Structures are given as structure tokens and as C-alpha cells.
Image (cartoon, helix red, strand yellow):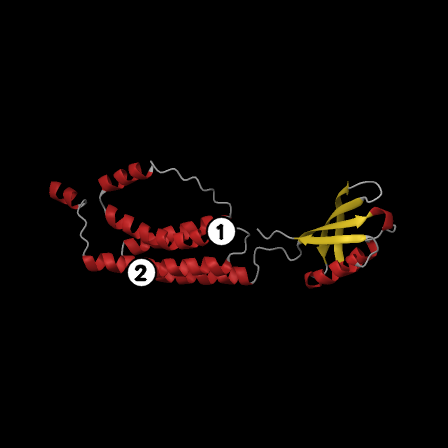
């Protein structure tokens, strides 16, 4: 009985196992990083984070090999890791997903579950590509923010109604402010709009700019 209990803490691993585990983790980590690189749509892309995904996958595999099935090592490693303080805030939900993706694949590679690591990487990557390609999570009709700067003394009455009616399903004035002196007063209008056809956004901007008194037009949409 005592002999069986002691065998729980025995973990045999060869040099070939170490090289194989790290190599599989490296290949899967590179794949994960490439998927992240080519699908990222936010405004704060980080090359360092992309490289970190590769290293995280490999490091996780090594950590699992170090722990093996030894409970003492596992608790010791948890204690050592508790010293580390992570200061960098993860702002994008997709970044968190990729971190867990790399950790999970690293775990599989570290315990020699190569089929799970490789096929898991391929399947999850393909599913994510499909989701991104077809904009699965985005609504069919998106809201844009349009900001229009005008010279108030040249602006006609109800200047934007006809153009909005032509291109937009919905428009809502959310803010108006004046900038400058009375003689050269600039009025800034902010609208939430929903386009009938998003491919005609440039035509909408061009028509707004043709209105007498319009100085500048900006159209914003934040995909993140």
C-alpha cells in the first residue's frame, strides 16, 4: 500500500519526450499567434503580445512537465507564482480568449496529448476564422457616429434632413456645440446614424460636404 502511494509521486520523462512536447507546443503556439495576428481588428495591436502567445504555450508545456504528478511540486509552483504581480490590463476580450487558448494547448502538449494539442489548435482556429469572416457577432445594421463642423452663418435651415433621409434608416442628434467667436462661429453637430447601405458611407460624406457652410465631416464606428 505504501509502495503504491509512493508511485503517485514518480514521473518518468525522457529527453525525447521533453523535445517532442516543446516542439509540439512551439508549432501550436506559432499557429495561435498567426491566427491572432491575421484576425485582430482592434486599435491596440501588440507585436509583443503576439510573441508572448508562442512563449506562453511553450512555457506552459514546460511547467506541466516540471509538475508531473507530484503534488508537492504543484503547490510549490503555485506559491512561487503568487509572488508575481501582473500589472498589464487586458482590455480586449479576444486577448483573454487567446491567452486561455495558448494555456490549454500548452497543457495538452506538456502531458503528451499531441492529438488534442494539434487538432484542438486547428479546429479552434478554423472556427474562429469562420466567425470573423462572416461577422457572426456583429449586428446586421450598425450605428455610426457622424460629426459635422459647419459655419453657422452660412448654414441653411434643416441642412442635413434630405441627405440623411436618402442614406439613413435612422438618425438621432446627440450633441451640438459652438466653437470660436461670434463672427466666425463654428457649430459642431454629432449624430448617431444607421445606414441603409454601409457601402455608401463615402457617398454620404461627399453629399454632406456639398451642403453650403459645411467645413468638415467625420464618420466613426468602433468595432471593439
- Residue 187 in the image: state x and y as whole percent: 79, 45
> Does residue 19 appear in the picture of this structure?
yes
Residue 10 vs residue 195, the one in the foreground: 195
Identify which residue is drawn at 41% across, 50% down.
Answer: 100
Q: Is residue 146 left or right of residue 48?
A: right
**Residue 94 image label:** 1
> Does residue 116 appear in the picture of this structure?
no
Identify which residue is drawn at 60% across, 55% down.
Answer: 138
Residue at disc 2, secondary structure: helix
Quickly name the residue at label 2: 24
- Residue 32 in the image: state x and y as whole percent: 41, 58
Q: Is residue 173 left or right of residue 1?
A: right
Q: Is residue 95 left or right of residue 172?
A: left
Near mark 1 (Cα within 10 A), the count class, few <14, some 14-19 or many ≥20, is some
Location of the N terminus by quadrant is: top left
> Seen from this angle, which residue lies furthest right?
157
Residue at disc 1, secondary structure: helix
Q: Is residue 128 left or right of residue 213?
A: left
How many marks on residues?
2
Disc 2/disc 1 C-alpha distance (Å): 23 Å
**Please, is residue 120 above or below residue 191 in the view?**
below
Identify which residue is drawn at 22% across, 39% down.
Answer: 72
Identify which residue is drawn at 76% across, 49% down.
Answer: 149
Near mark 2 (Cα within 10 A), the count class, few <14, some 14-19 or many ≥20, is many
**Please, is residue 95 above or below residue 123 in the view?**
above
- Residue 217 in the image: state x and y as whole percent: 73, 54
Disc on the earlier residue, 2 or 1 = 2
Q: Are marks 2 and 1 in contact (CB under 8 Å)?
A: no
**Residue 12 image label:** none
Amino acid at each position: 500500500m505504501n509502495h503504491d502511494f509512493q508511485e503517485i509521486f514518480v514521473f518518468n520523462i525522457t529527453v525525447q519526450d521533453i523535445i517532442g512536447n516543446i516542439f509540439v507546443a512551439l508549432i501550436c503556439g506559432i499557429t495561435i499567434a498567426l491566427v491572432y495576428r491575421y484576425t485582430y481588428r482592434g486599435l491596440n495591436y501588440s507585436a509583443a503580445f503576439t510573441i508572448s502567445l508562442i512563449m506562453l504555450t511553450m512555457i506552459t508545456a514546460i511547467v506541466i512537465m516540471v509538475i508531473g504528478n507530484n503534488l508537492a511540486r504543484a503547490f510549490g509552483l503555485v506559491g512561487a507564482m503568487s509572488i508575481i504581480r501582473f500589472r498589464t490590463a487586458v482590455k480586449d476580450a479576444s486577448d483573454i480568449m487567446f491567452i486561455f487558448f495558448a494555456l490549454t494547448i500548452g497543457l495538452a502538449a506538456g502531458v503528451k496529448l499531441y492529438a488534442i494539442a494539434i487538432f484542438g489548435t486547428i479546429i479552434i482556429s478554423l472556427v474562429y476564422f469562420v466567425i470573423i469572416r462572416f461577422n457572426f457577432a456583429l449586428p446586421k445594421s450598425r450605428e455610426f457616429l457622424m460629426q459635422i463642423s459647419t459655419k453657422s452663418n452660412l448654414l441653411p435651415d434643416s441642412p442635413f434632413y434630405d441627405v440623411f433621409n436618402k442614406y439613413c434608416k435612422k438618425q438621432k442628434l446627440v450633441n451640438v456645440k459652438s466653437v470660436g467667436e461670434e463672427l466666425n462661429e463654428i457649430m459642431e453637430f454629432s449624430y448617431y446614424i444607421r445606414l441603409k447601405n454601409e457601402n455608401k458611407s463615402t457617398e454620404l460624406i461627399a453629399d454632406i460636404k456639398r451642403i453650403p457652410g459645411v467645413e468638415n465631416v467625420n464618420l466613426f464606428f468602433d468595432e471593439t
